[in-house]
Image (cartoon, coloured by chain):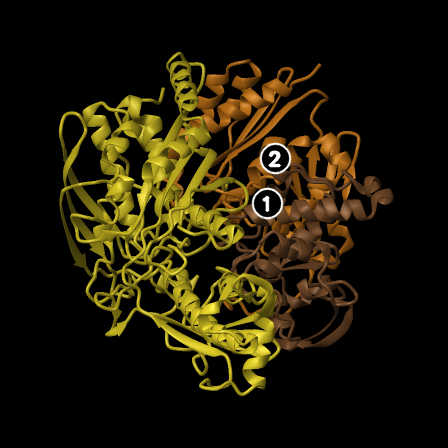
Amino acid sequence: MKLRMAVLSHLVNLRDIPDLQGIEIGADSVSLGAMVTQHELIAHAGLGEAVPLLREAALQIADSQVRYLGTLGGNVANGDPDNDMPGLMQCLDATYQVTGPDDLRQIQARDFYESAYFTARADDEILTRLMVPIPAAGTGYAYEKQKRKIGDYASAAAAVLVGKGFASIAMTNLADVPVWSAEAGVALAAGDREGAVSAALAAIDPQEDMRGPVEFKRHVAGVVPRRAIDRALSRVAG
Amino acid sequence: MDNPMSTAFARDYWMQGKIAATKDGQITGLWCHTTADHGGFDACADPTKFPAGFMNICTGSHDIPTAHLSVDGVNTNKALGGVAYRCSFRVTQAAYFIECMIEVLAIKLNMDATELRRINFIRKDQFPYQSALGWKCDSGDYHTAWDKALAAVGYDDLRKEQAQRLEDFRAGKTRKLMGIGLTHFTEIVGAGPVKNCDILGLGMFDSCEIRIHPTGSAIARLGTISQGQGHATTFAQIIASEIGLPADDITLEEGDTDTAPYGLGTYGSRSTPVAGAATAMAARKIRAKAQMIAAYLLKVHDGDVEWDVDRFVVKGDESRFKTAKEIAFASYNQAIPGLEPGLEAVSYYDPPNMTYPFGADICVMEIDVDTGEHEVRQFYALDGCGTRINPMIIEGQVHGGATEGYAIAMGQEIAYDDMGNHKTATLMDFFLPTTWGTPTYQADHTVTPSPHHPIGDKGAGESPNVGSVPCFSKAVHDAFRPFGLTQSHMPDDHWRVWKIARDLGLHR
Amino acid sequence: MSKMHVKLTVNGAAVEGLAEPRTLLIHCLRENLGVTGPHVGCETSHCGACTVDMDGRSVKSCTVFVAQAQGADVTTVEGLVNADGSLSVLQEMFREHYGLQCGFCTSGTITRAHRFLQENPIPTEEQVRFGMAGNLCRCTGYQNIVKAILAAAEMMNAQDKPSSTEGVGQQKVETAE
């Protein structure tokens, strides 16, 4: 619309729909409205305690002004492989709630992304809420992102959760969809850092862009998750 | 988005060089051949006789007896090129070239580059110095500046720290290398003398017209135009110093071609060297007339009064004086025999020579071998722009110019794909540094006035760019030097630095 | 699509009118309302020259439809001056410390800094650099911008000493890197 590539017959400001707002901290999970902004994710004290990984990642997205308006829902639903939140949601094993004309349904973040800009959401559905399980107390976490400067997308980014007998690893901007590897999580849960990284790397398919050629991306795609894993492990408590 | 795709780019030079020296480090000759991409058509503002700008300052700060420079200009299917952009006349390229050549020579001779420079710097007593490529450098004291810079950063300690870091790296204790970049540059700005500098036939003089009002306030009009360099402050200060009126009472007017005297504009650090000189000269014409008025009012001969800050005082009698403000009113108020009423003057200043600012930059950089990321830990910038009119403005120019240098050295490029599509059309892909990651600069200075400029000023806008671009690059080179790197192809963005490390076998 | 009826407050004054849905806030401000403080820089949300304050948030008005500002309270650099028209402490500090050169980014930079100092009244230099990273400047190298903001914070805290400690840290956004 801004670029005059779309002329729409109706304009609805989603910000005016109360059901799309709000951060609710439950016993086992948090419920996030699709229109919750990155700024709200960062500023919400309860969320910062329940899922600190969200805050850490949101701080690495764009800049202050963009975070004031940029929404979690927009970030995950667009299906842009550059975006940080899809990989993060896969790491956290979030569930998306999409609402259509007749019904609403739940889609796992890990099943949502089909290819760049193509998702499991139907054309007559909108993303309304996201449910994020609260990691067990003492779970280590880290979001590590290599970028050229603030405001840039990742050259490579990795989200890591690691706890007792449990781990989850997802990577961003290294394929046309976010990369979550079940094998990587299993390996890391068993204490095999290098096995985890190898498994994660097996699933990537980076493209050359101004950030660098494929070979470079493949290399940093190994470095960045190692750092995330080390930082997450250093934060494991209890 | 349209702007980076369709408007002009500044510099795309491919430079090759050879340098000759004796075994003990005395440089005997320099050769440079440059291929200059000027895009679809040439948009440069170079003086007519210098189609490659002042690339021939490429002997830099060194006493090099023989030098040869050739430049092939080529047109390509890119947007128009060669445009003026902070260092309009190819001096950054020249500095980059000689700074890299010095670096390579030090490696070949296995000499400390700081000492190699001391041997080859043009000595203070050699100025004015005739360079092999035709310039007469006006003044300089390079050894003093160099020693001051090295002492300011604690150079020897930095080298010790670097050696320790290298040892730790080799022992597997760290994956970060430390690089120290050093430059000593000599600029050529203040274009220029009409005898050899013109734009489309118009001599590169510049101008100032000053009118003092009866109240003692003044308006000055110039042929330049401030783009944020603080002309209103700097030129008002020049007038205030010359005529003794408060700077706050002086209005500057630039850029209105209906009223401004003819001038060639602001670029290439020429405003203060040329229009600033015109300002001082116009002010001195006014002061000369003011002296006659003061003498008349004080009933003495012209030669019996002398200037003291803001007034003419009768020699030997401080109680008898006329202030600039009183003189201004009198010039409109009293009929003075032999003098026209009013107090105004215009100067068209044709500089007798270019000016030659110089400086030393030192950069300390941390480099992540595995990701190619860097952090500029320290950047020291010594500026030798001659007489310093307003230190705050000069330092502001240093911060800004060095940040542009940082962008150029560490990431900025206009890239095209094989089909000629522009790949860097946004400010995300075209590297424009943000507050985060931009170095904090330590600005320092030495003062070596230009002997031919009315107030000794040499110009300050370009210098930080000229010196900093090679300085950042050389910090990268320096970090990898122990592993055999001599040069890299800028910009040193993440993946290119990563590639250096990979090609040197530093990845596990 | 027909025009939309839009009402908002700009620098304290209620304004309303008809706008095409695709009209950006920056264009409405500059072209319809004559509020030319915010500048059009990149139009891609990178440079921050168009930064305005909307309901207590810093936003890039080149990426906000005016329809999104329905009912909003918008403040631009014009609205930051003191009631008597004199420069605010923050503006004065930019002047004092040479925090601007060509001035193109300045209105957006100051408007962002104004909000930043409310988010974090006692910032460190690192926090200033992180919080101001959405405003590009090509002239200053940021050094004097950072200096001006830190100086303004100090002066503003000295001015309202009794209340200053309460709000500190509440909305504090520390750096992630």
Q: CA distance from mark 1 to mark 2?
A: 21 Å
Q: Amino acid at mark 1?
A: Val
Residue that numbered label 2 is attached to? C176
Which residue is at the front of the view, C163 or B208?
Answer: B208
Q: Amino acid at mark 2?
A: Ala
In this view, which residue lies farthest toward the top?
B171
Q: Position of residue C157 (x, y in %)?
A: 78, 45
Residue drawn 45% across the image and 18% down it: B174
Q: Give the letter of the chain under mark 1.
A: A
**In what element is the residue under mark 1?**
helix
Q: Give the letter of the chain under mark 2.
A: C
Q: Position of residue C50 (x, y in %)?
A: 59, 61
What is the tally of numbered marks visible in this picture?
2
Name the colour assigned to chain C in the rendering.
brown
Residue that numbered label 1 is attached to? A76
Q: Which chain is yellow?
A: B
Residue drawn 24% across the image and 31% down it: B119
Mark 2 is surrounded, within 10 Å at the Cα level, by few (under 14), some (14 to 19) or many (20 or more) other residues, namely some
- The answer to whether residue A213 shows anywhere in this view is no
Q: Which chain is orange?
A: A
**In what element is the residue under mark 2?**
loop
- The answer to whether residue B141 shows anywhere in this view is yes
The tag on residue A65 is none
